[in-house]
Amino acid sequence: MMVTRILNVVGARPNLIKMAPLVAEMARHAEIEQMLLHTGQHYDENMSRIFFEELGLPAPDAYLGVGSGSHAWQTAQVMIGFETVCQEFEPDLVMVVGDVNSTLACAVTAAKLWIPVAHVEAGLRSFDRRMPEEINRIVTDALSDFLFTTSRDADENLLREGIDAAKIHFVGNVMIDTLLRHRERASRIDLLGRLGLSPRGYALMTLHRPSNVDDPATLQGILSALEVIQARLPLVFPIHPRTRKNLETFGLDARVAGMEGLILTEPMGYLDFLCLMDHARLVLTDSGGVQEETTILGVPCLTMRENTERPVTVTEGTNEVIGSSPQRIVAASMAVLEGKGREGRIPALWDGHAAERIVRVILDAQRGET
């Protein structure tokens, strides 16, 4: 029996959500020997441990401990550490997920070592190269040998960029694999009771992108909108460290503290956040993954960005891209509260079996069946 050695890469918490079903599926196949590497790009020991435990991921086989830094520094540090791991493990395939700096760094390093690369969530495009993630996506896709897509528009993006159609595989969404696997378990958590909330009786928000939280004027505008929304219904806000720091730096923390309907919490584990999303009346976000998760949950989502790399969540799902102007945020939120939110439908192949399809493609290729 021929064994395929696969080196799986994670660098941030969203990567763990995407990698968990892949690791579990690979473990079912004796022909696969896998190694899990955590670059440490985003690393909080408590939060990462919670995610590993909740998602059933094994402890990483290798940890680079890179930490935060500029994009160039962080990418360079990952490349240096990852090269050593590749030389020691000698993988037949490197699998990267998403669009963080670790994804780019490991794809470039593997390609230069002539190691095939598989990119999960390939082909997503915002068409805004001011977003660092967009550069990461484009370069990773250009270097990958297997491009696993979540939607047909991603296929079209890749073909337009000259990617060989034989490398593109429409498989569905591994984030949805994880959500469907854990939804019932999350529903049993009494988090709403602890926070004094009732189902569909609150809004939920995430806010962390530099375009929203690094500019004082933009952040103040968003806070103006939140003042209106939290006066209508409780608004739960698990606050990102970057956002908390900037609120303090810009002298806005007292303004936030004065919002009686705003419930600030620390960053949450996967199950707690899934529980809150599933029962929310409305979700406000600037995250990519939340747009997909709310689509599956049937919860109206308002994305506080000027674009999205996940347009299927708008054309088929519950997502609406509204930008960051306070007037638009308030108007869109009130429309949802009046019953005018998008109902949406579940996109094709978002059925909980994406990881199975991905592993099947890889094994078929190793057997020479594709």
Image: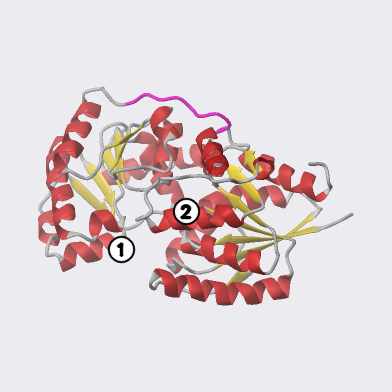
Q: Is residue 191 visible?
A: yes
Say which residue label 1 marks.
241
Identified at 42% across, 36% down, the residue is 311
Is residue 329 shown left or right of residue 361? Answer: left
Q: Is residue 218 above or below residue 327?
A: below
Label at residue 302:
none
Chief secondary structure of the magenta portion: loop
Give whichever of 320, 122 is nearer the camera. 122
Identified at 29% across, 63% down, the residue is 242
Applied colour scheme: secondary structure
The percent position of residue 7, horizontal first and vertical second, equals: 67, 62
The percent position of residue 259, horizontal first and vertical second, equals: 12, 49
Give whichever of 280, 252 is nearer the camera. 252
Q: To which quarter of the image does residue 197 belong? A: top left
Q: To which quarter of the image does residue 356 belong? A: top right
Say which residue label 2 marks.
14
Q: Is residue 288 above or below residue 349?
A: below
Point out the stretch of residues depicted in magenta. 342-350
Circle 1: residue type: Pro
Q: Do labels 1 and 2 touch, CB within 8 Å?
A: no
Circle 2: residue type: Pro
Task: Tell me how far mark 1 sits from mark 2, CA to CA.
Answer: 16 Å
Instruction: First in sequence, mark 1 or 2: give its number.
Output: 2
Give whichever of 230, 152 is nearer the camera. 152
Mark count: 2
The percent position of residue 325, horizontal first and vertical second, equals: 17, 43
Q: Which quarter shows the C terminus? A: top right
The percent position of residue 58, horizontal first and vertical second, equals: 62, 60
